[in-house]
Amino acid sequence: MMNLMHWRLVVAVADHGNITRAAERVGMTQSGASQALALMEQTLGVQLFSRESRQTLPTAIGLPVIEQARVMLGALQTIRQTVDSVRPMLRGTIRLASFPMVLASFLPPLLRQFNRLYPGIEVVALEVSDDEVETLLAAGLVDVGVVLNPAPERNAGPLGRDEWVAVVPTGHLLALRGTEQGVTLQELTALPFVLATGGCSTNARSLAAEACLQLQDVRVEVREWSSAFTLVRENLGVTLVPEMTLPVDRQGLRVIALQPPVERVFSLVLPAGQTASAAVQALLDLLAETSLASVR
């Protein structure tokens, strides 16, 4: 029965032209090497080498067999190098912090694909607020975190984006506008307002402050986006929310685009000054490949 040792012997004999030196190269005795070659030739039914007094040379049929053996052994070496290059990322744990909406929408497809490709790596997802993500990253308590609108120097991996939109009752004067007109942030801040935060520091109040505005009449402040939609239906006020939070059932609500548009961008970010581990880099590489594929 032929094995890899036999094929290494065949190549070594071809390289050295001598069974004794070939046997030393592959770690066999001279007699063992001679028996192995004889067994291979008997199994194949052809003579691979011509034995002369001082040399062992390939026969006509031996030459192509030896070349195929080289190809096979080269492919095996490539397989081993490939496995060795990824071995550090075949096992491990990634601690990932994210705020709820991204954890429930953008991350699951990515993490399912990552788990399929790297079943030995466990991703532990922590559901926290956006401020808590930054705190965990700063303390080095997580390996990667979802950050809103990260600065360019943070070398982030883009995960997704959406726009802020106004939501008003269907009977509101703003609801009578054409969809192409939209509403300005300045107009919204002057109206009775239902402030929804989603547990995040980036919300309608912070957006207004960035535009040198302020909410002039906040009737109620809630954490849950769903609570805000209920209160808007009850004509308690208008609200401003991320597009991804909109409910499937929009009865009683009118969604109006903000003009000019204001986007939220979420990205996977490493702790400052920290180099990605092999496992984290694999996740970032997959994210980059996924993002590129979605653009094509």
Image (tube, rainbow, N blue to C red):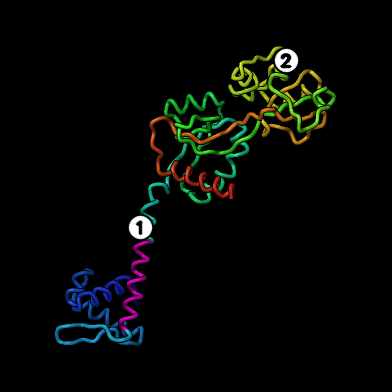
Q: Is residue 150 left or right of residue 189?
A: left
Instruction: Find out whether residue 65 is within the magenta segment.
Output: yes
**Badge 1 amino acid:** Gln
Q: Earlier in the sequence, mark 2 or mark 1?
A: 1
Q: What secondary structure is found at the residue carrying circle 2?
A: loop
Residues drawn in magenta: 62-78
Q: Is residue 47 above or below residue 27?
A: below
Q: Image point 60% across, 39% down: which residue? A: 106
Q: Image point 53% across, 50% down: which residue? A: 116
Instruction: Find out whether residue 197 is within the magenta segment.
Output: no
* x and y percentages locating residue 146 in the rendered image: 53, 33
Q: In the rendered image, which residue does mark 1 sit on? A: 81
Q: In the rendered image, which residue does mark 2 sit on? A: 190
Q: Is residue 2 above or below residue 289?
A: below
* x and y percentages locating residue 265 in the rendered image: 57, 33
Quarter of the picture holding the N terminus = bottom left
